[in-house]
Amino acid sequence: MPQSVPKWEDNIVAPPFCLLAGHYNIVCCSILASYAGNDSIGFLPRILIAMKSSKTRIIEIVSNVVIILVALIVGVVFLKTYYFTKHVPSIIRPAIGTALDIGGEDFSSNNNTLIFALQEGCHYCAESAPFYRQIIEQAAHRSDLHLVALLPDNNRPQYIQDLQLNIGDIKLVKFSTYRIGATPMLMFVNREGKITNIWIGKLEPSIEAEVMAALASTCDQCTPDHRK
């Protein structure tokens, strides 16, 4: 009597990894289907081959995910660096220690000179005028500090009066000659004509205090109250 072929569902107990989702379910079904067809490779070798193939696919998937994540991180860093970061342009300015040669200006006749580089149409110059008036008011009591206003050679000297700045020494110059690339610019110059300090733009209150302290530190005539 011919022996009946046992049904695979009567003899095979599903391995534990059949309970897992994804590739293991596919592997499990493939193994059971092969056994049902009386595959000559054998049940156990088929399991090992399928598991190896599945692990290889998982490694490939994980590798691809890592590559994608690295690419995303690099892309975010690139965008943040080159598109979302505000780049402050390099400002052309004279270097500290530069000796100035301004026609008609004798720096040796004063212990210190404060130069205001301004220009018409500069709204930061107009917004800085109240602070400059404070400087001028204190400088009025000093004989050792000279004030000079520099304007581009195509500006009107009247602009200084428009800002209500009481500066008598006004000179029209080519800003490029003195590497003045932005306004307003304050330059503190010693009696050798060398720049000792530079402040550019509309200043924050803390920097304004720094300017006043720098001026007071060179004042031989100032009282302790004026030095604060």
Image (cartoon, rainbow, N blue to C red):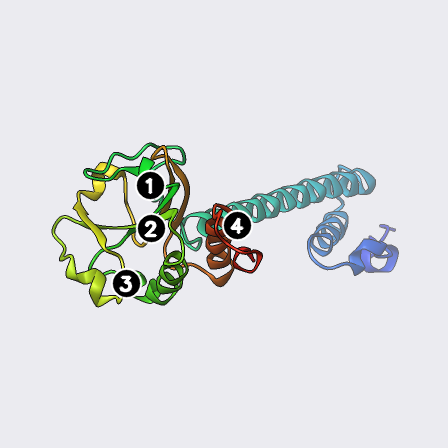
Residue 11 position, x and y percent, is 87, 55
Instruction: Give the residue displayed 53% in from the left and 50% down from the top.
Output: 72
In the foreground, 23 or 67: 67
Judged left or right of residue 92, residue 66 is right
Q: Up-down: is 159 above or below 216?
A: below
Badge 2: few (under 14), some or many (20 or more) residues near its Cα, within 10 Å? some
Residue at mark 3: 165
Mark identifier at residue 93: 1
Instruction: Give the residue displayed 41% in from the left and 60% down from the top.
Output: 138
Judged left or right of residue 203, residue 223 is right
Mark identifier at residue 208: none
Residue at mark 4: 72
Q: CA distance from mark 2 to mark 3?
A: 15 Å
Dot 1 and dot 4 residues touching (CB under 8 Å): no
In the foreground, 221 or 194: 221
Q: CA distance from mark 2 to mark 4?
A: 44 Å
Q: CA distance from mark 1 to mark 4?
A: 40 Å
What amino acid is at disc 2?
Met
Q: CA distance from mark 4 to mark 3?
A: 56 Å
Residue at mark 2: 185
Dot 2 and dot 1 residues touching (CB under 8 Å): yes
What amino acid is at disc 1?
Arg
Instruction: Give the residue displayed 28% in from the left and 63% down from the top.
Output: 165
Residue 121 visible here: no
Classify mark 4: helix, strand or loop: helix
Residue 58 position, x and y percent, is 68, 45
